[in-house]
Image: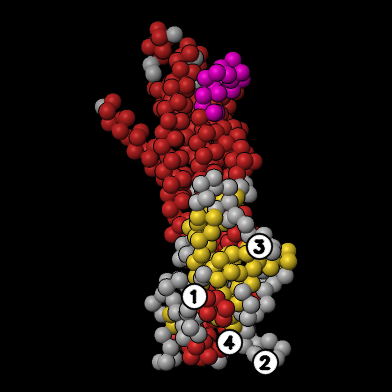
Amino acid sequence: MKFLKNLGLVLLTVLMLVGWVMMPWWGVLALAVLLVLWMALFRTGAQARSVASVGISTLTQRLGSSAVIVVGIAGVVGVLVALLAMAEGYTRTQRNAGSLDTAIVLRGASANEVSSSLSRDDLVQIEQAPGVAKNAKGEPIVSAETVVAANLPIRGSKTRDEGSAQVRGISEAAFVVRPNAKIVEGRTFQPGLRELIVGKGAVRQFEGLQVGATLKLGNQPWTIVGIFASGDAMESELWADAKVVNDAYKRGSGRNSATVKLERPEAIQAFSAALEGNPQLKVKAMTTLAFFSKQGEQMAKVLRIIGITVGAIMAVGAVFGALNTMFAAVASRAREIATLRAIGFRGLPVVVAVMLETTLLALLGGLIGGGVAWLLFNGFEASTMSAGSVGKLSFNLAVSPGLLWEGIKWALAIGFVGGLFPAVRAASLPVTTALREA
């Protein structure tokens, strides 16, 4: 019978945890309101409030054991939020590179720019497709672009290690289809010359990318004439004139992709349908927002899996720490709890009171862990290989309110598990047995 009772308690815990993970913030708020109303309006709720107030008032007398719960949970939340902030920052940087009023055209079977190729005839027909915006001269706003790789020395490496940087050959229209890109130092390159402008992210990652420096790309010397900022994935790239890049890397007249300014966001349907329905073309088109969001999905998923796995392993340790602490706290208050039950207090108020005490400590740990993660890691610079590219992506970790809330939910879940079993034992232990143990 005891085995079945414990099994049922474990199953109930699992079900409640699943429900807790899926619950939105307003559901948690509703639960908190219901709990407060129950404690204020019902006799059993008042009993729970009385027992909880006694337990909470004695926390200062148990600072050492209480600190075990708080510090353990703060560590779990801090590490979890920091790791998930990598996924959040990476996704945000990729997504910021796209918009709804621009489209990217790739070879039909290509998943990214690197594996795509467009001929000069393809580009001419893309420019003539419906929905393409035109400039003041009546010319279609299309930036046909080439993507190649370059190995550059990594900044701060004592062994002169090299990393892969993405070089993008662009046209003048690139600054129109990407209005966020602005020259912040120096000037833009002159068409027809071996000149480069480099993103701020690339400057942070690689050595020697200052204005006036010379690089060797495609066995030819190139001069850096400017630095640009865009606040997105493009900041990790080096830009130059597409024709010169093609000549240096012997790419002919073709390009890897074409980025198009649309007349309006709704024009993507007509534009995409016209291109995909053209028997002379084997291409696909989508908004740049959809494209870059998709590019970041896989890496973000990997980073989240790593974060949740590490957090779960640490959470197990925090749960055992909370269990030991709360079992000891319940044992030290066995006489008090037994006396309360002897004078008419029911088991439910005792369970709720112990759970409230643990939840308070867990909430404190969650707030501390989330706060430390925000102070140390929000905006922290990192870099990794960018999915679907040939270069590293520089990005900033982002500790968003959503991640802080996720960390607090983890903290409360740990507190729930760590307090449930000691609370049930305190409520179910026979009064006579409790008094003898005391």
The kind of residue on which mark 1 rests is Tyr
- Left or right side of 130 for 316: left
- Alpha carbons under labels 2 and 4: distance apart: 13 Å
The kind of residue on which mark 3 rests is Ala
Q: State the colouring used for the structure image.
A: secondary structure
The image quadrant that residue 78 belongs to is top right
Q: In what element is the residue under mark 4?
A: loop
Give the main secondary structure of the magenta stretch. Answer: helix
Residue linked to disc 1: 249
The kind of residue on which mark 2 rests is Gly
Residue 391 seen in the current view: yes
Residue linked to disc 3: 213
- Disc nearer the start of the sequence (2/4): 4
Residue linked to disc 2: 138
Q: In what element is the residue under mark 1?
A: loop
Residue 228 seen in the current view: no
Q: Is residue 61 magenta?
A: yes
Residue linked to disc 4: 131
Where is residue 175? Give x, y as percent.
Answer: 66, 75
Where is residue 152? Give x, y as percent.
Answer: 54, 59
The kind of residue on which mark 4 rests is Gly
Provide the residue span drawn in magenta. Answer: 55-71
Q: Nearer the viewer, residue 226 or 91?
A: 226
